[in-house]
Amino acid sequence: MQKFLIFSLIFGLAAAVDSSTTVTVPTTTAICQDASGVNCQLYISQCSDPNYKPLLSGKCDKTCGFCGPKLTTTKPNTPCVDSASNCVNWVKNGFCTNTFYNCTQRKQYCAKSCNLCNTNC
């Protein structure tokens, strides 16, 4: 397997990982504040509710205590390939645009042919 060298400036470490390794990197936001024009005190009881966290994140970070290091998980240089051998024919028959198949299915089988490698489904 092809190896990639990752230098972690945060911890001063170096590690070699292959393309199947997932790397988690902490990032921080410079200023912790709530968005202007949003009365976050009205929503403080929803801060810990998993259904509301995505809605409140980025708008009520200070009030909800969402500030601090956040972890970003990435897979370095994952090769873009088709897992199905019939993608060339499927693409000709409209597989990439057919609404019968959802984005996740199209990416699973024909990521390269459907140009979905950098698409989050």
Image: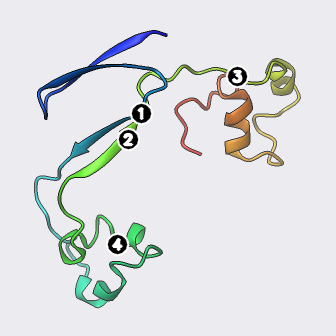
At mark 1, the secondary structure is loop
Dot 3, crowdedness within 10 Å: few (<14), some or many (≥20)?
some
> In the displayed structure, does residue 50 sit left or right of residue 115?
left
Q: Amino acid at mark 3?
A: Asp
The residue under the point 78% across, 24% down is 84
Residue bearing the label numbered 1: 22
Query: Which dot, 1 or 3, sits closer to the camera?
Result: 1
Q: Nearer the viewer, mark 3 or mark 2?
A: 2
Residue 6 position (above or below residue 103): above
Earlier-in-chain disc, 2 versus 1: 1
Q: Position of residue 55 (x, y in %)?
A: 40, 71
Q: Is residue 38 left or right of residue 31?
A: right
Label 1 CA crowd tier, 10 Å (few <14, some 14–19, many 20+)? few
Q: Are marks 2 and 1 in contact (CB under 8 Å)?
A: yes
Q: Is residue 120 above or below residue 87?
A: below
Q: Residue beneath label 3, please?
A: 82
Mark on residue 89? none
Q: Nearer the viewer, residue 57 or 76?
A: 76
Quarter where residue 14 is shown = top left
Secondary structure at numbered mark 4 = helix
Amino acid type at image mark 1: Thr
Query: Which residue was labeled with disc 2?
Result: 73
Q: Which residue is mark 4?
A: 56
